[in-house]
Image (cartoon, helix red, strand yellow):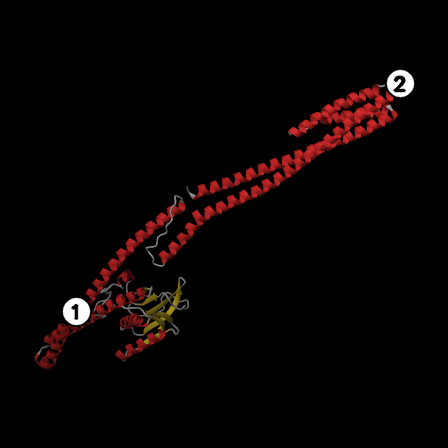
């Protein structure tokens, strides 16, 4: 049963219980009202009986026609009340029936009394006899009326008892309704806690365990509703993740072993290659020193080319090793002043190439949190490139700074050197990719690939903007950096 069906069932049960309670309460109040009407009717019968008794006494005293007419009027109202009685119980019905029988006796007694001639018209003996007859008749009449009045009071008592019983029923129904509603509400909340809230809490715990790396956590939720289906999907997902991560761990172990083998191989190859390269360079230099006077210009040029090729090969091996080391090196992030680092690299370049006029524009206060050693390698390559490609510029300018682009700080190294064609910009950061001839601008073509790998390890990126004959700008960013000012698209 899904959650929506459970919700509809719980709602329907609650409304049904409320409707049942309301119906019973209405019925109980109807009983109270009916008992009150019975009591009012019994009280009215008692009043009419009392009034009739008073009128009977009044008629006996004076034998007035007015009293007799009043007696008949009261008697008629009393008969109407008894005829329209709303008595329902067995006791009430019996009392009303007895009252009707008494009414018949009273009417007959009063008829005899009212039809008897006046006492004053007879002789003395006859007056005594009549007086005795009237007295007996009046006594019977009053006795029957008193009995009727007692029965009317009994009707009032029965109606009061019925009213009390109905009121107690109302109180009981209200209390029972509240208890029933509380039970339904409590049962609903218990079902919600058991079938909805509890599984949701376990799902939340499971996601926390999963986020913490506990891939073996089991939810233990069984059900045929949406949460049960979600739990089964969760279990299937964690199973897939366990299998995927196990496969990743196996591949990482294989990759780690392969990297170790490649590292050992690269060091072995570099060692095995360096020895013949050093021999080539050394023997070529020895030939030039010892037999230079015996060689013609062509021979000397051949030896010089051999030396240059061996040295270029050694530099290429060093760059390849450096590229592999950048990928494996552990990061140790610290706060670095890029401006101070750039100034140190600039001073080193000027010392290595004295006499070359280059204007440096280094923006102060460039702060970034990076691995200092790797960032020095990256900045060294960028500044060395700028130095190299401004070698043929009359008034060389190299600028280092920062600016804001798309809400993110972008550091830049810009120059006014030879630049390049932006159609080939995608080749800049690949190993051994060159946009200029090695005879014009020597190099191995690995420097920018090293820079890109260093910035990627810092969750950053690098890109270039350039124009042939007007210079180039390399923009780069890292995950953690200070904000710089807004700037132009090409700082140089």
Q: Nearer the viewer, residue 141 or 393?
A: 141
Q: Nearer the viewer, residue 492 or 461?
A: 461
Q: Which residue occupies the extreme front position in the image?
A: 125
Report the side of 39 relative to 393 (left or right): right
Seen at 34% across and 57% down, the residue is 214
Question: Which x, y percent locates residue 49?
Answer: 77, 29
Seen at 81% across and 20% down, the residue is 112
Question: Which x, y percent locates residue 360?
Answer: 34, 75
Q: Can you say which quadrant of the picture contains the C terminus?
A: bottom left
- Quadrant assignment, res 267: bottom left
The mark that comes first in sequence, 1 or 2, is 2
According to the picture, the residue beneath numbered tag 2 turns out to be 126
Taking 245 as reference, is 436 above or below it?
below
Instruction: Check if mark 1's residue and mark 2's residue have beta carbons within 8 Å.
Output: no
Secondary structure under the numbered disc 2 in the rendered image: helix
Q: Nearer the viewer, residue 84 or 206?
A: 84
Q: Is residue 163 visible?
A: yes
According to the picture, the residue beneath numbered tag 1 turns out to be 268
């Amino acid at each position: 049963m899904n959650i929506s069906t459970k919700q509809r069932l719980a709602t329907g049960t609650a409304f049904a219980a409320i409707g049942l309670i309301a119906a019973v309460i209405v019925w109980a109040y109807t009983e109270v009202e009916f008992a009150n009407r019975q009591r009012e009717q019994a009280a009215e019968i008692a009043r009419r009986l009392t009034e009739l008794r008073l009128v009977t006494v009044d008629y006996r005293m004076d034998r007035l026609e007015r009293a007799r007419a009043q007696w008949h009027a009261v008697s008629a109202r009393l008969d109407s009340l008894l005829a329209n009685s709303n008595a329902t119980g067995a006791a009430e019905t019996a009392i009303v029936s007895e009252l009707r029988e008494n009414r018949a006796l009273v009417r007959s007694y009063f008829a005899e009394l009212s039809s008897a001639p006046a006492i004053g018209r007879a002789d003395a003996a006859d007056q005594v006899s009549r007086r005795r007859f009237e007295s007996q008749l009046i006594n019977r009449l009053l006795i029957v009326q008193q009995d009727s009045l007692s029965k009317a009071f009994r009707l009032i008592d029965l109606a009061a008892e019925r009213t009390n019983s109905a009121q107690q029923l109302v109180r009981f129904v209200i209390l029972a309704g509240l208890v029933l509603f509380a039970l339904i509400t409590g049962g609903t909340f218990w079902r919600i806690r058991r079938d909805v809230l509890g599984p949701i809490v376990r799902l939340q715990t499971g996601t926390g365990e999963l986020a913490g790396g506990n891939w073996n956590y089991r939810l233990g939720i069984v059900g045929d509703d949406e949460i049960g289906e979600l739990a089964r999907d969760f279990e299937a997902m964690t199973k897939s993740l366990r299998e995927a991560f196990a496969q990743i761990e196996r591949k990482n172990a294989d990759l780690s072993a392969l990297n170790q083998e490649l590292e050992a191989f690269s060091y072995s190859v570099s060692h095995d290659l360096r020895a013949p390269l050093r021999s080539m360079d050394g023997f070529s230099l020895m030939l030039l020193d010892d037999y230079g006077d015996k060689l013609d210009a062509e021979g000397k040029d051949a030896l010089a080319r051999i030396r240059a090729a061996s040295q270029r090969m050694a530099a290429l091996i060093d760059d390849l090793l450096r590229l592999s080391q950048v990928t494996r090196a552990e990061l140790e992030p610290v706060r670095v002043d890029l401006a101070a680092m750039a100034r140190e690299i600039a001073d080193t370049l000027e010392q290595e190439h004295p006499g070359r006029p280059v204007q440096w524009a280094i923006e102060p206060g460039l702060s970034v949190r990076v691995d200092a050693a790797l960032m020095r390698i990256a900045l060294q390559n960028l500044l060395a490139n700028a130095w190299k490609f401004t070698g043929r510029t009359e008034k060389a300018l190299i600028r280092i700074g920062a600016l804001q682009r798309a809400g993110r700080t972008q550091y830049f190294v810009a120059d006014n050197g030879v630049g390049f064609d932006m159609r080939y910009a995608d080749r800049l950061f690949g190993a051994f990719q060159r946009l200029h001839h090695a005879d014009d601008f020597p190099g191995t073509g690995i420097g920018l690939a090293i820079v890109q790998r260093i910035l990627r390890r810092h969750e950053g990126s690098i890109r270039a903007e350039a124009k042939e004959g007007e210079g180039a700008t390399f923009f780069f960013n890292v995950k953690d950096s200070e904000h710089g000012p807004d700037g132009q698209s090409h700082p140089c």
